[in-house]
Image (cartoon, rainbow, N blue to C red):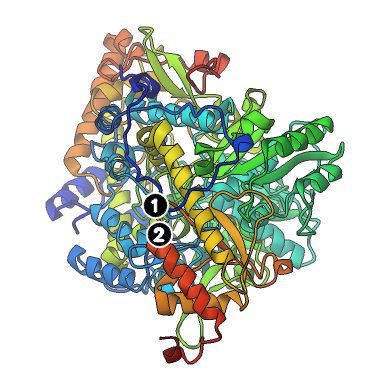
Amino acid sequence: MEPFIYDLSRPGRRGVDMPDPDVPLTPLPSEYLRDDLPLPEINEAEVVRHYIRLSQKNYAVDKGFYPLGSCTMKYNPKINERMARLPGFAQIHPLQDPSTVQGAMQLMYELQQMLAEIAGLAAVSLQPAAGAHGELSGVLIMRAAQVARGQGHRHKILVPDSAHGTNPASTTMSGLTVVEIPSGADGNVDMDALKAQLDDQVVGLMITNPSTLGLFEQHIVEVCRLVHEAGGFVYGDGANLNAIMGIARPGDLGIDVLHFNLHKTFSTPHGGGGPGSGPVGVTAELADFLPGPIVAQNEAGEYVWMMPARSIGRVKAFHGNFGMHVRAYTYIRMHGAEGLRRVSEDAVLNANYLQALLKQRGDYPIPHGDRFCMHEFVAQGRIAGAEGVHTLDIAKRLIDYGFHPPTIYFPLIVPEALMIEPTETETKETLDAFADALTAIAHEARTDPERLHTAPHTAPVRRLDEVRAARQPILARVPGREPA
Amino acid sequence: MRYTPHTDADRRAMMATIGIADVAELFADVPAAYRFPPLNLPAPLTEMEVARELEALAEENTHMGQVACFLGAGAYNHFIPAVVDVVISRSEFYTAYTPYQPEISQGTLQAMFEYQSMVAALTGMDAANASHYDGATAVAEAVIMALHVHRPPRKKVLLSPVLHPQYRAVVRTYTQGMGLRILGDEQPDTDFHALAALCDEETAVVVVQNPDFLGQLHSPAEMRDLAAAVHAHGALLAVSVDPISLGLFTPPGAYGADIVTAEGQALGNSLSFGGPYLGIFAFRNELVRRSSGRLVGETVDADGACGYVLTLSTREQHIRRGKATSNICTNQGLNALAAAVYLAVMGKQGLRKVAELCWHKAHYAADRIAAIPGYEVLAPKPFFKEFVVRCPRPVADINRFLLDEYGIIGGYDLSHDYPHLGQAMLLCVTEMNTTDEIEDLVQALNEVTESRLIPLEEVF
């Protein structure tokens, strides 16, 4: 058990020495001062040891296979980190005169162009800080464009039932109404259900393609055509772009707005929860509505800040998560067109190989296993002959085998879902070992289910009581105060 | 390709298992007319080559190591102890994701719980979430949270005109579809007293900044009066703070704030041209179930040992979908970790010392500038590390001179956001500014007044 940070504190210890002021002192206004500053007092070495010991309790991509579906946990190239830390990128102020940051603005400009090219769209804003932030921007763009068309009465956003939860949440934040569209038995959008909702109240459709079932939407062109005919726009959730770089361009298929997850597809690290980066791209018709400012080039070839004419506004202070832009730019430059296509082909090859292995062995149902998957697929933790065992047990047991579990219980439309995304950076040996672990766990499930119910056995802690955490929440401990 | 490991033999074996002869068969669902489009991208580079290209781009930028910087306005050049980068460069932290599997994420979870605890301590609030995107979006989330405290939701929001202009813009972007009335910042001289007078039974929240965008500190007494007036109408008070200032000054929890937000970049995060930064978000206990973002809670494992988990997830989008308190999923976890390490290593003494250095140096600089003929320091109240200087020439011209002749990045030009102040700049002085830099600034400002801008040769 690693001590709580405050338990390392002893009055009088210091982690940093700061110099004394070398200017004449100005008296402090006593009535403004705080009584006490309850921060810890720890020497530098103990701070370092505390965090290094904590780090060792984490699983991470750099330790092993992390097939967390929908999150694209690919290897993060180390050159990205070095580039983002160059003083000319890491130590520049966002409000500096543009003439003093032309290199950074050129990088952003070229990244805007490259992302637009990859997606088949006309313009990109790098400002959103994460996928959900890009989604919010995208929904606001569709809404604003409808208002500009004199269609401000429209209020419906259609969202397939397999969508990420951020889609309906972003819709609600935009003041619009979510209408859920069911999926058909084949994993595609149910076309009849879609048509039934396509009226003059529709702002747009949000679609994830490939879907969260890992399937390429077979009717995508028709879906886009129908939505456009009804006067709506089509929003593409770019969370699954890793499957289709150089394979298909969303803009060619009819998508009007798309967000990119630089922390998924373009290898910027996930940071234990963030930071991400969620640029949003649009067709020429919608370019004026992008959040901004974005980077443009003037006649003299200089890079300048430009606020799109009918922008939804800024969605963040300054210009976006620039440190992530540097990493994504590095990644795209190292791959080029053929390299990115290879990335997507191998991401899809790996997922299909793993799906084929699991199909052959037959322990885990794969509802859409009759189709080729894209970069991920959804299996079920329903093992014949082990009815008391659930997906959660299988996930926890995978930890003992040295793997990060897949995404579980999502998408919601598949009971006992195990959503598996291997990514292209994994070797065949890793995929074989993971399939072997799942096979071994299926055997254990039938012969020794208790071992699964009580898993994990080798992690730093045993299974944690999440119900207790939510019933009596303790979110902070500050010395001298009751826990809150 | 170094990042895709398959050999031809691997590929053949895998395709045989799948039952295909060509990888292209996997993409049969993509309409043929749109399949395999050529992408017009620059040719790929090796690591050695790409590093050269990026180093060249980086060299085109003027960075903090080359110049003296007196620019703040929401992004600050503060000292970052070496420990911070060592910790956030640990692969175990930066190549993990959101801790959905707590048993193998106790490192991230405990670090986040400790971050929440230290933020609660710093702000004087009960609890904090695990981060928003930045100081601006944290304010927008605070506004949205406040709307739903009442049934039916209240629709009026009051923003102080000296809340960061970009934060006010982001609140308006976020809420543009919600049918709100956002008032208070139409007149630039609306003070907190006048803002309180606009508060009524329709008002969900009043948002102010302390120290405000122009650097002014509002006293605990003034803030308590504001809180009382706001609470009398059942509205919430949200305060955006500079976390470094809290090393010295009374925290918002002590004067009645309901929600405290901050740009946390100053706590151990590099300037990085505006991001990734850190949205600090703290609140009173009563608001916890309406709060947005990830929350880490303490619990026990099956053996009764202490451990940490993500908790109260039923507020969040992956459970509640369209009825969630926010759409946020990915946050700024690694920036929050940097802030936690910064607070732990700086500690009680170090953070106070940083705040004191800012105070003394900023006041010294202000005194020296106020003595230059033609300049006026506009600081009716005490200020922390930023202050407004009215200048004898357009700020853009002065800043150009400072940069070209002295290698100084001058202050933020206020003429667009606060035209009533005239030719005014917002100067920022932190512990990073040496006395020599301040003397250079004073000398340079002096020279500018003497109408020697053109031709430059005459300056020397």
Looking at the rendering, in which quadrant would you find the C terminus of chain B?
A: bottom left
Dot 2 corresponds to which residue?
A: B435
Residue at x 80%, y 46% (from the top left corner): B195
Q: Is residue A80 left or right of residue B277?
A: left
Relative to A364, is B276 above or below?
A: below
Q: Same chain, marks 1 and 2?
A: no
Relative to B111, is A223 above or below?
A: below
Label 1 amino acid?
Answer: Asp
Q: For the image shown, how many numbered marks are present on the structure? A: 2
Q: Is residue B114 left or right of residue B125?
A: left
Coordinates of residue A203 in the picture (x, y in percent): 70, 56
Q: Is residue B33 visible?
A: no
Label 2 amino acid?
Answer: Thr
Coordinates of residue A103 in the picture (x, y in percent): 38, 72
Chain of the residue under label 1? A
Callout 1–callout 2 Cβ contact below 8 Å = yes
Dot 1 corresponds to which residue?
A: A22
